[in-house]
Image (tube, helix red, strand yellow):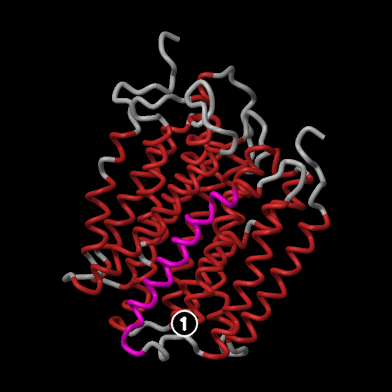
Amino acid sequence: MSQAPGSSRRGVAPWVPAALVLTLVGWGGNQFTPLMLLYRDALGLSSVTVNAVLGVYVVGLVPALLLGGPASDRLGRRPVTTWAVLTALLGSAIMAAGPLGLWLLFPGRFVTGVSVGLAMAAATSWVKELSAPPFDHAAPGAGARRSSVALTAGFGLGPVLTAAMAEWAPAPEVLPYLLHLVITLPGLLVLRGLPEPSLLSPRRAAPRSMAARSARSVRFLRVVAPAAPWVFGVNAVSFAVVPLVLSSAVGGHDLAYATLLIALTFGAGVAVQPLARRLDDRASARALLVALGVVVVGLGVTTLTAATANPWLGMVGSVVLGASYGINLVSGLQEVQRIAGPDDLGALTGVFYALGYVGFLIPTVLALLAGWFDHVTMLAALVVLAGVCLAVVARFSRTGLPGS
């Protein structure tokens, strides 16, 4: 090659545009969250209906993760990431038309889920590949941290700006989605010219099934899989369950409070990621164990929040849960990138994220069970479940280490 494949004529590292796309698509995926209370109050929707709209996002996201990962391994990262941007634009366009009928919210969220699933599977792998020689000479694990920060930034920035527009701008059910359309459209341009590391190396037999071969490894099944659902499960508890539980306690400031919890959750998730790097240990699952320990503490604080209806305690719980999210996401991706074979990185990344988003259904499940159990009981049950997952990961912490 006449120049390093990762060098840019403008001096921008090649991983940056791929990470930017993750931020833009993540923005679109989470901008609905602060509007849950607005839709509930303005349209007279039940909590079950609102959480169903939130949950249908996962119905689109999980198949996109499982299909998009292997597709990006076989076809390259660019085409799959491009489809992610296109479906993100379509999802926001449908959501902007939501005031024409409640039924539009369901396909809008479904398409948005597809966009996020494709981006997380393909662009995360792309950032990892572009963070390694000869494209970049960053420290090991930099790809996992960079994609994690980019995704978290989108997940946090989108809902904060959406909530601000809902509070002070006209047409809050429309304007946030139009803004996302405007800022995401250039994402199609930034992908042009980026190198495709997976296509530059000799082609290997691409996985033919939806699941990566590496997903059947002992370490993935016994160490990564038990921790994965808590990656996004804690976020769902923090900014989808807690605001509903405390809606009467915060008076007429429920939208502002929900937005604050989102900002605290993702702010803590970004701030703690340097710690996640230092916790990572190739000879154990130390980082995942710390992450799950923090999950147990955060869910315990959230259970006390529900018992006392204390908004201040809810804020503390969101910070703790956000910290667990940041550690869990980075350490989980680092484990995945060590486990994955040379031909199924995208596929295994998709499986990891798909398992992570199983936890995003927690608010929907709790809403369905609310007729039989109170929130204190249900959140306490989550504490116990997280403790069981912690025990499983601890038991197999040194099992199936790469290279062993």
Asked if the magenta segment contains residue 256, the reply would be yes
Q: Is residue 203 above or below residue 215?
A: above
Give the tally of numbered discs.
1
Q: Secondary structure at mark 1?
A: helix
The crowding category of the residue bearing disc 1, from other C-alpha atoms within 10 Å (few below 14, some 14 to 19, many at least 20), is few
Q: Position of residue 385 (x, y in %)?
A: 71, 71
Is 112 or 153 nearer to us in this picture? 153
Q: Is residue 81 above or below residue 267?
A: above
Asked if the magenta segment contains residue 343, the reply would be no
Horizontally, residue 181 falls left or right of residue 219, namely: left
In the rendered image, which residue does mark 1 sit on? 312
Residue sticking out furthest to the top: 2
**Point 23% across, 56% down: residue:** 179
Q: Please give the range of residues in magenta.
A: 251-276
**Point 83% across, 57% down: residue:** 395
Horizontally, residue 77 falls left or right of residue 386, namely: left
Q: Is residue 76 above or below residue 284?
A: above
Is 367 or 398 nearer to us in this picture? 398
Q: Position of residue 263 (x, y in %)?
A: 40, 66
Which amino acid does the dot numbered 1 rest on?
A: Trp
**Point 41% across, 8% down: residue:** 2
**Point 35% across, 50% down: residue:** 88
